[in-house]
Image (spheres, grey):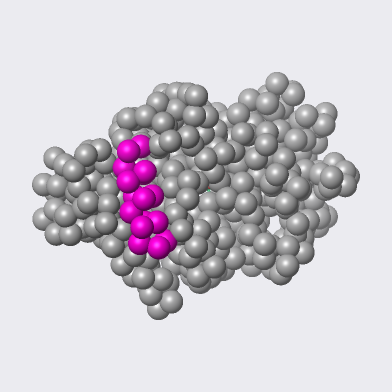
Amino acid sequence: MHESRKTADAVVVGSGPGGATVARELARAGKAVVLLEKGRDHRLIGNHFSALRYADKSGLSFTEEGLNLVRAHITGGSTIVYCGSAASPPAWLRSKYGIDLDSYAARVAEELHVAPLPDEVLGEASLRMLHAANSLGHKFAKMPKFIDPSICKRRCGGTCMLGCPHGAKWSARAFIDDMKVAGGELVTRADVQHVMIEDGVAAGVSAITPQGMLEVRAPTVVISAGGLGTPCILQRSGLHEAGVGMFLDPLVFVTGVARGQGTALGPPMAIGTYELIDEGVLLSDLIDPWGMWLVMTAMSRPGRLFDWVRYRSQLGLMVKIGDDRCGHISMDGRVSKPLTTSDRQKLSRGASIARRILIEAGCDPRSIVVGPVRGAHPGATARIGEVVDQNLQTRIPGLYVSDASVLPEALDRPLVLTIISLARRLSDHLLGRTAN
Ligand SMILES: Cc1cc2nc3c(=O)[nH]c(=O)nc-3n(C[C@H](O)[C@H](O)[C@H](O)COP(=O)(O)OP(=O)(O)OC[C@H]3O[C@@H](n4cnc5c(N)ncnc54)[C@H](O)[C@@H]3O)c2cc1C
């Protein structure tokens, strides 16, 4: 088999928000950076057929307990398919773990113009649910978004989660482009197998590519393969403490049929409640893209497939919970994540609240269904305090982690702003800069 070798100051594995941020910051500081990504640089995004190619197992990946797992293998990672919602890092990261991200998050939010969407961009359904929830005494608000309202085209039909073909939704690809301009190198279709460790310190990584084996030698190795990918690489490199326990932020969609425009005709997760966040529950307006709606309904409630003809007038609320840490990931990527009694209680409480809001917003109560449980935010698989230290370094000098896997607990809220902030903090550390 053909073998090739590269050398760099730093090699970063995975081009989601955790990896792309570090790669950009190091390249901009003049470091020679190689960014390795398992997926391709698909440019045709935003429709069901292309999404089948970059969604992990075409969207049909499951835990051993049957929870559907959603993530993307593509340049930009899961920010290609995310909803573009932003939330500040939780206060407990500072009080409990001594990690202050406030100034980082404020600068990222300013740079990426994070803000709630104006009424004229919000869908009619979002506004209806906002008023319905507030009239029931829940404190719903417009959510801050990584979406440029001047580009966002309404009526995309729920396809935002397949990738934004208009470029309205910020994705980590923007940072990869910046990295390339600064001289960094992106290698796609490079499936990293393990970290090379020589004399007890990180020396680079080894990857399988379509051309054969690729070895990238670098004194700084940053693993950013996501909450599910990173622990596999660490375990294959001898760090068996990774992948033991995780959060998945389990979620369910509660949907019902009403008159007028449905949730799919506006940007997803445009409104939501933070009032229950301290109890580990988040509610926000969301419905599956139509193709995924069909697959999920066929698998969980085939008797309701006929509702698909009224897809465009369905209202949807996502109930997402901050779950207990448990389960494990095997070296070969198998995931076990049982739901605890407390997780099930939170989901069921959130679903009851969602049901009342949907009825208040005009849904026929007989049409309301609760979909299957899924997980889209894996993390805590290489936790701060257990697998990495406060500077995100593992017990192997030179080997760092920068992605959702370092988060020590479920955030109960959108993660991307926190992941970028942590990655900026790591970049400062690697460059010997003090935080400002
Ligand atoms: C449908 C959906 C909607 C979401 N909506 C939101 C939202 O609105 N707001 C929010 O904040 N969060 C949202 N999230 C979650 C958010 O997208 C993730 O938390 C975030 O992308 C995680 O970033 P990461 O850097 O940890 O990993 P990822 O984004 O998963 O990136 C990891 C990258 O590493 C690559 N990789 C994996 N293994 C290897 C390997 N062996 N070698 C090389 N490369 C590898 C992957 O292909 C991937 O590109 C959503 C997620 C999903 C799935």
Residue at x 54%, y 43% (from the top left corner): 144
Most distant residue in the top direction: 181
Residue 249 image position (x, y, % from top left): 47, 60
Count of residue discs:
0
Residue at x 32%, y 46% (from the top left corner): 128
Magenta segment includes 134: yes
Confirm whether residue 209 shows in the render: no
**Splitting the image into 4 quarters, where does residue 301 fall?**
bottom left
Residue 393 image position (x, y, % from top left): 76, 56
Residue at x 70%, y 50% (from the top left corner): 422
**Viewer-closest of 356 and 86:** 356
Dividing the image into 4 quarters, which one contains the N terminus?
A: top right
**Splitting the image into 4 quarters, where does residue 236 fall?**
bottom right
**Viewer-closest of 109 and 389:** 109
**Viewer-closest of 112 and 296:** 112
Residue 294 image position (x, y, % from top left): 21, 45
Dominant secondary structure of the residues highlighted in magenta in the image: helix
Seen in the picture, residue 375 relative to 11 is either above or below; the reply is: below
- From which residue to which does the magenta span run? 123-138
Seen in the picture, residue 262 relative to 407 is either above or below; the reply is: above
**200 left or right, relative to 96:** right
Dividing the image into 4 quarters, which one contains the C terminus?
A: top right
Magenta segment includes 224: no
